[in-house]
Image: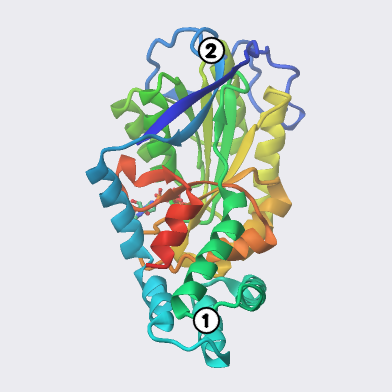
Amino acid sequence: MFSFFKKKPKVEPAALPESPPEALTDLPQQTEPEAAPVVTAHIPPVAPAQAAIEEETIIVAAPVAAEQKRSWLSRLKTGLSKTSSSLTMLFVGAKIDDDLYEELESALLLSDAGVEATQFLLNALKKKVKEDKLTEAAQVKAALRMLLIDLLTPLQKPLVLGRHQPLVMMIAGVNGAGKTTTIGKLAKHLQAHQQSVLLAAGDTFRAAAREQLTIWGERNNVTVIAQESGDPAAVAFDAVHSAQARGTNVVMVDTAGRLPTQLHLMDELKKIKRVIGKGMASAPHEVLLIIDGNTGQNALAQVKAFDDALGLTGLVITKLDGTAKGGVLAAIATTRAIPVYFIGVGEQIDDLQPFNAVEFVDALLG
Ligand SMILES: Nc1nc2c(ncn2[C@@H]2O[C@H](COP(=O)(O)OP(=O)(O)OP(=O)(O)O)[C@@H](O)[C@H]2O)c(=O)[nH]1
């Protein structure tokens, strides 16, 4: 479960739409946000958010019941068991010699850490063994643990809320990465902490995705802005205006899944981002890439391509309860150190947790 840690007071008044969007000239004229051609799943009365957001807030892991924590960590550990068993086995009764380093190199490569992170870790480990005159395999394993923690800690950053009114988050990723599921989990957590949430069903490509989000919104008292057809950028624009008019705290813009190689679809994402900025000059404040933890080294290619196109501000790695190997986080840390705000280990609401480098490394090293 998430909790919120209050930080320094800061309020940004809701801004009016700055200018009509150039990119939306083909859309029906918008007089007031409510008059926009939207299908609204559910609009609960939302009090102006000014009072609600009087301070910046950060999502942090809350102290959870010991049993709940054990369950979450054990699912993470089970998910990463392939990597953890091969890394742990290496050190059992091992001598510190070239064979050990070679086996470690193979295990790291097999864990999807990639060549760069693997070489970095091996070189740093050899240096540490020499400098500290380590003689026991257990000491080398402990040194590897510290190196991994140092490598992954820069990825551990909290998602700060309350910086803008509304805070606009755009969500992207390849097909089936877990975008909609993650949006649902995040929305419920945000609501549980008195944040009003509005979702933009920007996956206009797949009608079922729009319906999925709309039904989900109805059930969970979350307003969903959708259009029966049309431009996802227009849906995002309407959502930002609507949130400004209602004083909603957080807008999450869902987008259709796409491969980085589908250049026209990557251009569409850039347009969505641009048009959100026409609705609110500082937005989007977060551009999140959702990555399926089972995609291995391809995840790195996804990070690079989406970052080049959009300028990512954060990542969410899902499905680490599956057959994920986990090493890809080391690859990301070495090549594009974009914060990993959350990791997912299942389909339930509490299965999304803030990324914690120490917990992750301990799950990885058994
Ligand atoms: N085991 C597991 N399954 C997950 C997790 N996150 C999402 N899923 C499942 O992954 C599948 C795809 O999730 P969606 O949220 O629909 O993915 P999406 O990225 O929105 O998909 P498209 O809109 O088709 O691109 C669903 O069956 C989810 O339940 C996770 O952390 N663990």
- 94 left or right of 245? left
| Residue that label 1 marks | 135
What amino acid is found at the position of numbered circle 2 in the picture?
A: Gly
Coordinates of residue 332 in the picture (x, y in percent): 61, 60
- What number is the disc on residue 247? 2
Q: Is residue 41 visible?
A: no
> Against 348, is 296 above or below?
below
User: Quarter of the image containing the C terminus?
Assistant: bottom left
Res 67 → quadrant: top left
Q: Residues within 10 Å of mark 2 (few under 14, many from 20)?
A: many
- 4 left or right of 74? right
> Against 265, is 221 above or below?
above
Res 325 → quadrant: bottom left
- What number is the disc on residue 25? none
Q: Earlier in the sequence, mark 1 or mark 2?
A: 1
Res 85 → quadrant: bottom left
What count of labels does the image hold?
A: 2
Coordinates of residue 73 in the picture (x, y in percent): 33, 53
Q: Is residue 17 visible?
A: yes
Coordinates of residue 321 in the picture (x, y in percent): 34, 59
Does the beta carbon at disc 2 come under 8 Å from ligand 1?
no
Q: Residues within 10 Å of mark 1 (few under 14, many from 20)?
A: few
Of tags 1 and 2, which is closer to the observer?
1
> Against 245, is 62 above or below?
below
Name the one closer to the observer, 143 or 356.
Answer: 143
Name the one closer to the observer, 331 or 211.
Answer: 331
